[in-house]
Image (cartoon, grey):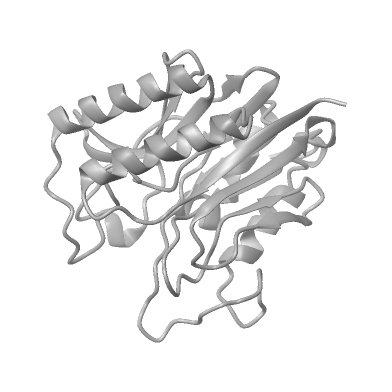
Amino acid sequence: MSRSRIALANIRIASTPDESVDLAGTAIAEAARRKVQIICFSECYVPGYRWPGGNVPPPDPAFLYRAWEKVASIARSAGITVVLGTERITARGLQISALVINSDGTVAGWQDKEQIDPSEELTYVPGKGRRIFQAGALTFGVVICHEGWRYPETVRWAAKRGAQIVFHPHAHVYEVGGYRPTTFADPANTFHEKAMLCRAAENTCYFASVNSASEGSGTTSAVIRPDGTVQCYQPYGVEGLLIADIDLSLATGLLASRCRT
């Protein structure tokens, strides 16, 4: 049986960009102590997601490069792969992205967010292109927030190309008047957590969705098995690493491979 230990960094939202790097480093070190192979952070964890009316400073290329280098150095020391939710400035503009760092600290590549939410169009531009990554025996893809909720094709793309797990960094905080769940996939809640179950079951792959910890958030971090059942989820608003040992033999990609379109 081939297994892989993953961690979802369900940690608190940082108050500054510098703090986001420090908290990410602490989470990576803790994951290494717990013998994790790969850790994934929420959407734009470094420097912080740009919520309307928020206080994240303007995009700073110099800060981002320093942050990425520091995280890569920590990953190398820890010996684990990191999927870092971040942003990057390209010729296209400011993009939401996931930086994948190998366990030796080298950069495996980027997965930019292709399908941005309509509310993000004044701040970010969509990326272009998808790819698959490798961490030892684990093959994985990344879809970011809105992509995984509304565009199941993004998850299927990865599963059809051998991804045993698809990581789903997202950002969700309390909205005034919003539902405050206490149970995962509560029927009274929005569709989002139910979508996690679908993304796994319709592709026969693991789906690992990661949010930051915040009071009243309508979603939490969770690992869903390839049959669409919940392996584990983080209690709402509770900061910490959600760690799961996944059985790669279950992630056959069968239903993804049978899709004719």
Rendered-image quadrant of the N terminus: top right
The residue located at (71%, 30%) in the rendering is 4
Q: How many marks?
A: 0
Q: Quadrant of residue 247?
A: top right
Q: Residue furthest bottom?
A: 177
Q: Is residue 47 left or right of residue 42?
A: left
The residue located at (28%, 39%) in the rendering is 95
Asked whether residue 126 is in view, the answer is: no
Whether 157 is drawn above or below 161: the answer is below
Whether 43 is drawn above or below 63: the answer is below
Counting from the top left corner in percent of width and height, residue 78 is at 49, 22
Counting from the top left corner in percent of width and height, residue 147 is at 48, 49
Counting from the top left corner in percent of width and height, residue 109 is at 42, 21
Rendered-image quadrant of the C terminus: top right
Question: Residue 142 or 260: which is nearer the viewer?
Answer: 142
The residue located at (84%, 37%) in the rendering is 250
Question: Residue 29 or 58: which is nearer the viewer?
Answer: 29
Q: Is residue 125 left or right of residue 6?
A: left
Counting from the top left corner in percent of width and height, residue 257 is at 77, 34
Asked whether residue 133 is in view, the answer is: yes
Q: Is residue 215 left or right of residue 92?
A: right
The residue located at (45%, 60%) in the rendering is 213
Whether 153 is drawn above or below 211: the answer is above
Q: Quadrant of residue 74?
A: top left
Q: Quadrant of residue 173?
A: bottom left
Whether 217 is drawn above or below 80: the answer is below
Q: Is residue 247 left or right of residue 88?
A: right
